[in-house]
Image (spheres, rainbow, N blue to C red):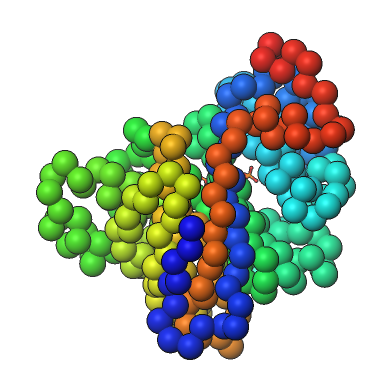
Amino acid sequence: MTRDGSTSEPPAAPTLAAVWVVDLDGIGADAVDDLARRWLDREERSGAAAKRDPSDRRRVLASHLALRLVLGSWLGRHPAEVRLTRAACPLCREPHGRPVLDDPAWRASRSFSLSRSGDLAAVAVASGPLAVGIDIEARPPLVGADDLHAGRHPDEDAALAALPHDQRDLAALRCWTRTEAVLKGWGTGLGVDPAAVAVGLGSSPPPGEVDATPIGPVTLPEHDLRRAPWTVVDVGVAAPAVVAAAVGSNQRSSADDAAPPVEVEVHEVALDELLARHPDTTVIGARSG
Ligand SMILES: CC(C)(COP(=O)(O)OP(=O)(O)OC[C@H]1O[C@@H](n2cnc3c(N)ncnc32)[C@H](O)[C@@H]1OP(=O)(O)O)[C@@H](O)C(=O)NCCC(=O)NCCS
């Protein structure tokens, strides 16, 4: 479903985005390890190896398999052929900004983002010159209450206080998820204080539907950072989770542009189903290990 988040003259064509919410639970550790050895790059494997808990390790690997399956089918490539790198951090210029496609032609016109929470992963892809960020948070939340409270803009605190008590927990989680999606789209992550950015409390659309709202523009002089208006998308899912995506431009020159209109497709799928759709995958014994 689509809603236009623009405030003034929109670009001629909407940015096409897809959000995939993937249940990572159905694949056993042995099958995940086997595919990870064949498909993932060294960076992805070492990110997983840094996790102490074997379940966390499996989830990181499984989320990267999901990412590569989505990107591979989007780009018409085998998942192992998708080459990834990191953009420069907008704050310090070191190469730990947004993950991006390594191929410069694709990088200019395709953006993606990955998030994990418990046994769920979310992948967002967007076509066009704009960047995308995504965040998924399981319900009940795994995010600490301290994070949730420290990360809110004063306007959001006021909006939350105006809600009936029984709606506040969900609205606070949505607000956090929207904020993280924006900061991941910008590539700063939590290097920018989430309380400095007002994204609003958003809404909870039904599964498969989305609700898009414009935010910004945002200027953070302490970081020498200016961002054009972005479109924040609440993504309705059947899974026990809150999902938000954010789409916009990271170019300084576009700081006065309108928030981009976006058309979003929502897919919810289990990793073993995603694997079964891939012609080059055998997941025998997927649920063992
Ligand atoms: C980016 C960040 C918000 C992700 O938090 P998280 O709790 O791991 O959340 P998620 O599960 O939603 O996202 C993880 C994914 O985000 C992506 N990611 C990592 N850094 C990112 C960035 N700067 N921008 C956008 N996406 C990023 C990666 O794909 C990562 O998956 P991976 O670790 O398997 O590679 C968090 O790691 C962060 O803020 N890091 C600090 C950034 C910072 O301080 N920058 C300033 C340095 S000067």
Give the number of callouts: 0
Q: Residue at x 60, y 70 (%)?
A: 15
**162 left or right of 211 in image:** left
Q: Residue at x 39, y 72 (%)?
A: 215
Q: Is residue 218 visible?
A: no
Q: Is residue 15 visible?
A: yes
Give the image location of residue 24, x and y in percent.
60, 29
Location of residue 211 (image quadrant): bottom left
Location of residue 4 (image quadrant): bottom left
58 w.r.t. 86: above or below: above
Give the image location of residue 232, x and y in percent.
44, 64
Give the image location of residue 94, x and y in percent.
67, 64
Location of residue 162 (image quadrant): bottom left
Residue positioned most to the front: 1
**190 left or right of 160 in image:** right
Give the image location of residue 140, x and y in percent.
34, 33
186 w.r.t. 221: above or below: above
Quarter of the image where the C terminus is located: top right
4 and 288: which is toward the camera: 4
Q: Residue at x 74, y 44 (%)?
A: 68
**209 left or right of 39 in image:** left
Q: Residue at x 38, y 47 (%)?
A: 206
